[in-house]
Image: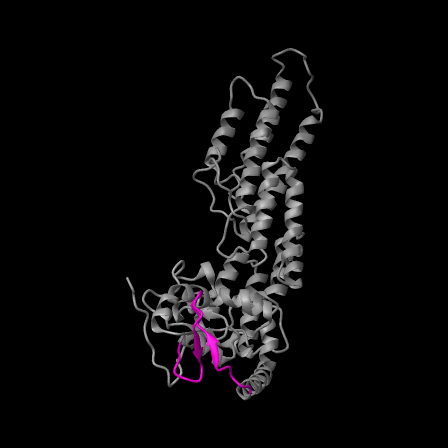
């Protein structure tokens, strides 16, 4: 789920408990199962120790070194701690940590005896490292806010802060950083749930909540997966099935269901909003055309003082001229000569035509497809809102579409209606001169 934040692992020497082990970060189901097993194991240990302390109904304590009653009691205590520290339950947190289990078994089976304090220190060290690796593992969707939380949490583990305090702060941060009130409430409810049945209803309410604007297909989709949650099928399995069905049917993406289903509401009024924006844009363009255009402007090459007459034949960047016609505010870039245009090409292209996805661009650190400088386009949804998000190519746009919507559309409340680019088209009377390698 989106509120399931994960943390970047910090560089450093490998842990002595590293090696063959779980794949971090754990899934929501894995965390829940491990948490439940941990609580049950602790309760079982406390109950066992309490029972062992009770005097037997018969027999006596001889007080001698070989006292059978004392030996039996010691073996019971050892067995209780061994089950707690080395549980055979497949859901125990240490099930996939073989190096920890070998080290713990060596201590517990030491014929010369062992210190309970040493055993617990080994357990606590491994358990904290396991939690740190889980909560501090990077994912491609990490935001700066998430990375900040992860860095803080990792520092707390390394600084020796009590585990309970770290987990409490982490849970509070997840709720605080959640993308919506529904997501925050979901995280709080899951963190405080006590049973599979209770969690099933939380999942149904969050992922499958009916909405008055739902289409028949959406109603059927939600009803189907609500029944799966209520049948106590694991959360991760249901969520994977939901994603696959949504992708196969080209229906609403799963993130739409996760984020308050807000786009369903916006879709009804989107066409009216688009129409209004178009009218405002047309009016603005008419006003701009009525204004007298400057006749003389300075050459765009840095350091060149030559002036260019815009009313005569000009040498200018075709992409910037296209963006200017669209209503963008970057302005036109004109040059006094082909040589100056070519000299400024690389610097200008890097700064003015950079892909809006930055380091997430599939061609990064290049500025786009090799050898192509005119494959750019604008997200049509952003353009309707007069926000010109420039992509280096259609391939990059389709590869990063979901992340682009998450970063740009949601923050600006832009409806996600189109999955195509408005591709660059030079002016009809413009002759394209390709970049020349002066070397």
**Residue lying at 47% horizontally and 63% vertically, measured from the top left:** 357
Q: Quadrant of residue 235?
A: bottom right
Spot occupied by residue 258 in the image (x, y as percentages of width and height): 58, 65
Image: magenta residue range: 291-315
What x and y, as percent, mark residue 34? 57, 45
The residue located at (56%, 21%) in the rendering is 114
Say if 424 sits above or below 243 in the image. Answer: below
- Describe residue 101's horizontal placement relative to residue 425 as left or right: right
Residue that lies at the very extreme toward the front in this rendered image? 305
Helix, strand or loop for the magenta stretch, by majority:
loop
Q: Is residue 312 visible?
A: yes
Describe residue 63's horizontal placement relative to residue 419 as left or right. Answer: right
Residue 416 horizontal side relative to residue 171, left or right: left
Q: Position of residue 241 (x, y in %)?
A: 48, 63
Residue 274 belongs to magenta span: no
Q: Residue at coordinates 65% horizontally, 11% vertically from top-left?
A: 64
Say which of 146 and 42 sits in front.
Answer: 146
Q: Quadrant of residue 313?
A: bottom left
Q: Residue at x 63, y 56 (%)?
A: 177
């Amino acid at each position: 789920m989106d509120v399931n934040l994960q943390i970047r692992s910090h560089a450093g020497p490998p842990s002595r408990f590293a090696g063959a082990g779980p794949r971090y970060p754990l899934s929501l189901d894995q965390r829940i199962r491990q948490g439940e097993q941990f609580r049950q194991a602790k309760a079982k240990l406390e109950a066992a120790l309490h029972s062992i302390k009770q005097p037997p109904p018969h027999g006596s304590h001889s007080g001698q070194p070989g006292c059978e009653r004392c030996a039996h009691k010691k073996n019971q205590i050892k067995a209780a701690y061994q089950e707690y520290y080395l549980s055979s339950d497949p859901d125990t947190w240490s099930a996939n940590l073989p190096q920890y289990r070998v080290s713990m078994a060596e201590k517990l089976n030491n014929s010369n005896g062992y210190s309970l304090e040493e055993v617990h220190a080994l357990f606590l060290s491994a358990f904290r490292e396991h939690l740190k690796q889980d909560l501090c593992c990077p994912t491609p969707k990490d935001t700066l806010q998430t990375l900040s939380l992860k860095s803080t949490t990792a520092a707390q583990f390394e600084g020796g802060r009590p585990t309970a305090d770290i987990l409490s702060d982490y849970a509070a941060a997840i709720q605080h950083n959640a993308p919506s009130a529904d997501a925050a409430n979901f995280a709080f409810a899951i963190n405080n749930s006590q049973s599979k049945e209770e969690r099933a209803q939380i999942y149904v309410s969050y992922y499958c909540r009916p909405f008055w604007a739902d289409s028949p297909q959406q109603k059927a989709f939600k009803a189907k997966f609500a029944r799966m949650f209520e049948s106590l099928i694991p959360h991760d399995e249901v969520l994977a099935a939901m994603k696959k069905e949504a992708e196969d049917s080209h229906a609403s993406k799963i993130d739409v269901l996760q984020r308050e289903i807000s786009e369903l509401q916006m879709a009804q009024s989107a066409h009216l909003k688009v129409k209004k924006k178009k009218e405002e844009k047309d009016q603005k363009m008419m006003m701009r055309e009525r204004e007298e255009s400057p006749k003389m402007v300075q050459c765009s090459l840095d350091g060149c003082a030559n002036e260019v007459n815009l009313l005569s034949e000009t040498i200018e960047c075709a992409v910037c001229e296209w963006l200017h016609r669209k209503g963008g505010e970057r302005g036109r870039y004109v040059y006094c000569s082909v040589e100056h245009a070519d000299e400024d090409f690389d610097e200008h292209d890097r700064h003015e035509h950079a892909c809006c996805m930055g380091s997430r661009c599939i061609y990064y650190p290049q500025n786009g497809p090799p050898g192509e400088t005119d494959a750019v386009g604008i997200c049509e949804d952003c353009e309707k809102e007069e926000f010109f998000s420039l992509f280096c190519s259609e391939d990059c746009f389709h590869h990063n579409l979901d992340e682009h919507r998450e970063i740009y559309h949601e923050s600006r409340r832009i409806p996600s209606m189109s999955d195509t680019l408005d591709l660059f088209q030079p002016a009809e009377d413009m002759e394209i001169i390709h970049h020349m390698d002066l070397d």
